[in-house]
Image: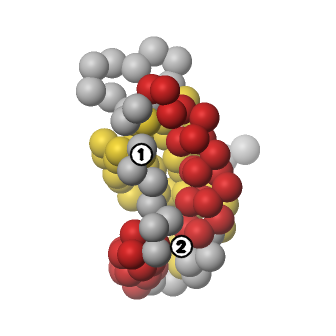
Amino acid sequence: MEKWVYAVHTVCQSPGREKEFHQWYDKIHIPDILKIPGFRRTTRYDIREPSEGQGKYLALYEIETEDIDKTMALLRDAVVKLREQGRISDVAMVLARALYRQISNIN
């Protein structure tokens, strides 16, 4: 089983709706994504000093899977369905995404 981290950089498109953005992300979006097989946990961060054009928020999704391509296809399919169900917020904007495979774990 391989371990991966899916990093998603976002911003809230409407500064007056930050509270709504965080509530949606934590109470709706993350639980929806964690239903996808392979997605194990999510940790969110905010940046101390963002540069121009850089995402203010970072979500790290931890994934364990035998087939990352299949897992990411399940994610894409789920997002389409969630959008159709009105479960994707118009206040969130993704600026960047990256998928990282774990190559070591040193404690």
The quadrant of the picture occupied by the C terminus is top right
Residue 26: mark? none
Residue tagged 2: 2
Asked which secondary structure carries label 1, the reply is strand
Q: Residue at x 42, y 44 (%)?
A: 91
Q: Name the residue nearer the viewer: 40 or 84.
A: 84
Dots 1 and 2: beta carbons under 8 Å?
no
* Amino acid marked by disc 2: Glu
Of the numbered discs 1 and 2, the one sitting upstream in the chain is: 2
Whole-percent x, y for residue 21 in the image: 53, 42
Q: Is residue 75 above or below residue 54?
A: below
* Amino acid marked by disc 1: Ala
Q: Name the residue nearer the viewer: 26 or 9.
A: 26
Q: Residues within 10 Å of mark 2 (few under 14, many from 20)?
A: few
Q: Residue at x 57, y 41 (%)?
A: 20
Q: Is residue 2 above or below residue 24?
A: below
Q: Is residue 41 above or below residue 79?
A: above
Whole-percent x, y for residue 8 in the image: 42, 49
Identity of the residue furthest to the left in this view? 53
Q: Residue at x 40, y 69 (%)?
A: 83
